[in-house]
Image: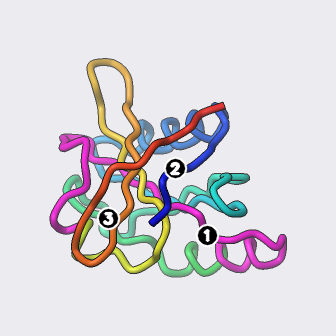
Amino acid sequence: MQKFLVLQNTHLAEMIRHVAAQSPLEACGLLAGRGERVESTLPIANADRSPARFRMDALEQLRAFDWMEARGLDLVGIFHSHPAGPSATSPTDIAEAVYPVVHIVLSPSGEEWRARGFWIEAGQSVEISLRVE
């Protein structure tokens, strides 16, 4: 299990811009990098266009994976929003998690967005540290 994920302030700001622009619908995207370090944020359209769930647009997701591969980067995280809460992974998030990467949930906290990281494995979700530099 991965214990933490390192990202820059700019990565966090890019995620927040994407999810805030899509609210009140859920928004989603991928995080590319190496090991525990994020190097790029890749927003992906939510094909479900739903306030309560997300499904990444298949073509955009494929293009993002091709982009990562061409640059020698790996999938290190997936992010999505819960515009109406909760600030943690939902039972649906846990049931539908297929990649062994950090899952970041962004949710509103007053006027700000809060980001929390989770490792999902064997039907369990454990909070991990997000180290923002």
The residue sitting at 22% across, 74% down in the picture is 123
Whether 91 is among the magenta residues is: yes
Residue at image coords 39%, 54%: 80
**Foreground disc of the pair 1, 3:** 1
The residue singled out by tag 1 in the image is: 75
Taking the spot 56% from the left edge, 80% from the top edge, the residue there is 59
Of the numbered discs 2 and 1, the one sitting upstream in the chain is: 2
Is residue 49 positioned above or below 115 on the image?
below
CA separation in Å, label 2 and label 1: 15 Å
Magenta residues? 64-92
100 to 5, vertically: above or below: below
Q: Is residue 19 left or right of residue 48?
A: right
How far apart are the two marked residues, 1 and 3, measured between alpha carbons?
Answer: 18 Å
Crowding at mark 2 (Cα within 10 Å: few <14, some 14-19, many 20+): some
Query: Cβ–Cβ below 8 Å for labels 3 and 2?
Result: no
Query: Residue 13 falls in which quadrant of the image?
Result: top right
Looking at the rendered structure, the secondary structure element under dot 2 is strand
With respect to residue 62, does 32 lie above or below?
A: above
For the C terminus, the image quarter is: top right
Q: Are marks 2 and 1 in contact (CB under 8 Å)?
A: no
- Dot 1: element: strand
Dot 3 lies on which element?
loop
In the picture, which quadrant includes the N terminus?
bottom left
**Tag 3 residue:** 54
Q: Residue at x 26, y 66 (%)?
A: 93
The three-letter code of the residue at mark 3 reads Phe
First along the sequence among labels 3 and 2: 2
| Residue 30 located left or right of residue 66 | left
In front: mark 3 or mark 2? 2
